Image (tube, grey):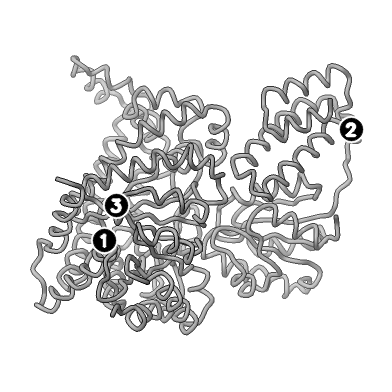
Amino acid sequence: MTWQEKREERFKRWLSPNVKFATPEAEKLYKERLTRFIKAIKMEKPDRVPVQIPGGSFPAHYSGTTLRTLMYDYDALKKAWMKFIRDFDMDLYDSAGLIFSGRVYEILDYRLYQWPGHGLPSDVSMHQFVEDEYMKADEYDAFIKDPLDFSFRYFLPRTWGTLAPLGHLPRFDATLGLPFQLLSICSNPDFQPVFKAMREAGQELEKWQVVVGECGQLALETGCPSAAGGMALAPFDTFADIFRGTRGIAMDIYRQPDKLLEALEIVTPRSVESAVTAADFAGCPMVFIPLHKGADNFMSSQQYEKFYWPTFRKLLLGIINEGCVPIMVADGSYNDRLEVIKDLPRASVIWIFEQTDMAKAKEILGDSACIGGNVTAAQLYTNTPQAIKEYCRWLIEVCGKGGGYILTLGSSVDRCDPENLQAVIGAAKEYGVYK
Amino acid sequence: MPKDFVNLLADLKEEEVIKLTTQRLEAGDEALTILEDSRKAMELVGDRFAKGQYFIPELVYSGELLKQITELVKPHLAQSGETKRLGKVVIGTVAGDIHDIGLNIVDFMLDVNGFEVYNLGVDVPAEKFVEKMKETSAPVLGLSGFLTLAFDAMKDTVEALEAAGIRGKMKIMIGGGQMDDEIVKYAKADAYGGDAMAAVSLAKKWIGAK
């Protein structure tokens, strides 16, 4: 099968979810909304411009509670999420699973984030990423030799405090032909707390999953398509964001570029596989890819073309070839990248931009890819609904021309006047109808 | 030789510039002269950054090289190594926000451009900014914030300075991920800077340095 044929299969499955719709109208609404979205992906003209509001932690604010409450009280999460879905008439919805369980984080002592009440004031509306060298400068060889071993014995023990004893494990290949080697872990007293915490985390996670599953089910039944498929990181961001951090990656670009390039190649097919597996499981072909350190002001065009784009492109092609749809959210501006990222099969991806010049994006990508985004958090926070609606009208007029456009935000939003989000939706309905 | 040194550092030639530093020290070059050359090189780095020839990796890497050179030179420094400074700038990431990458780059660029920088770090409460501005009488304050929650924290900080009656004695610049001119108005600051060199230009303009 070609990638388009594979994708059609996936679209069909997405359009016919395994669910009993509440009413025939709900079913009709579901198909209308999703068809609108799918047509935009395929660069065709839908009946009107599809609109989406990324959830972020806005549902907490909107239901008069805090992000912390939703992270710890799953019933509150369900209530807030359903209210958000009910009150905002969008074409595609984020899963409540975006708000992860604070309890699971705590049980396993998650180190990658700080969240409300855990390193941050209880009432803040976001969690924050803790940048560090979770991979040391001299560990590229270990990664290149055996990424799985690196993950188990180096990366995971540093990101989950409770799993620290994994760092003292012998290499897993000790078990090759000698399966008994594994059992030596079980008798090691260091590992008893690991097993106990994993069990506890598993039980807690299940409670959270049940509620998130119920939210998804309820949303579907009432005709709301979900955007939750797989997720991936651009290979460079895997290293620059997570493994090495800003300082570490800057050093590597200068001190060990060849090792970095080799490691990027190694992680790429693995990221494709895990993203596609997750999309299979979810029954939704979307693969969400947040983009960070390839933005205009992070690196030069030469660096982008040497370190960022080649493996990122391979990742995208790998995902596309399985019939999935990468949806990128490019933080910052991507003006200098537009000519480069054009080099993909036509109508195979979605680019959501934050601060990129949207007229330029349409001009350069208009024939090749679906675009969207750009209503910024700052605008939503400070402008009036009228101003937001006017801005969206401009976006629709410039970017919506001929189809291949989704009206959405440049990033998720944590707090703003709800009327500003209604103004975005209203603009799609009022100005986005294709004749 | 100094010109070579300046270019080697500005061109980020790690091995060569470190080797040359050692050679200069062995040949009896003044530690202060080497530091002055380093400052010239960092000015070139800043220029190239402003012109879009250098980016974050180059700023970080040049900072690392400068650190190595300073370490080598330090033991040779006479005690009275006080250099002339353009003026004071207080910076910090506002309350509730713990991002420090941009903040530290701004710190570094202000420092190598001759400012006396007071970096209050991250998650800085409004009162702490007020206290430091009173203590230092710095004419420039830089507020950093990456998240949307920083919008209000910036506004609160500016209002705390107003309440303390010292808002008029300073210019306030803001920067970071989601900031823009809208937030300047919202937070009642004076200007937005899109990158570390913008912070340097604003500080120079306000302090009246060339």
- Residue B44, how many percent across, how many down? 75, 42
Picture residue at 16% right of the left edge, 54% below the top = A10
- Residue A357, how many percent across, how many down? 51, 63
On the image, numbered disc 3 is attached to which residue? Answer: A287
- Tell me: A332 left or right of A314: right
On the image, numbered disc 1 is attached to which residue? Answer: A42
Is disc 3 on the same chain as disc 2? no
In this view, the residue in front, A406 or B15, is A406
Q: Is residue A58 above or below residue B6?
A: below
Label 1 environment density (alpha carbons within 10 Å; few <14, some 14–19, many ≥20): many
Where on the picture, by quarter, is residue A50?
A: bottom left
Q: Is residue B12 above or below residue B183?
A: above
On the rendered image, what quadrant is the N terminus of chain A found in? top left
In this view, the residue in front, A272 or A177, is A272
Measured Cα–Cα span from mark 1 to mark 3: 16 Å
Q: What amino acid is labelled 2 in the image? A: Gln
| Comes first in the chain, label 1 or label 3 | 1
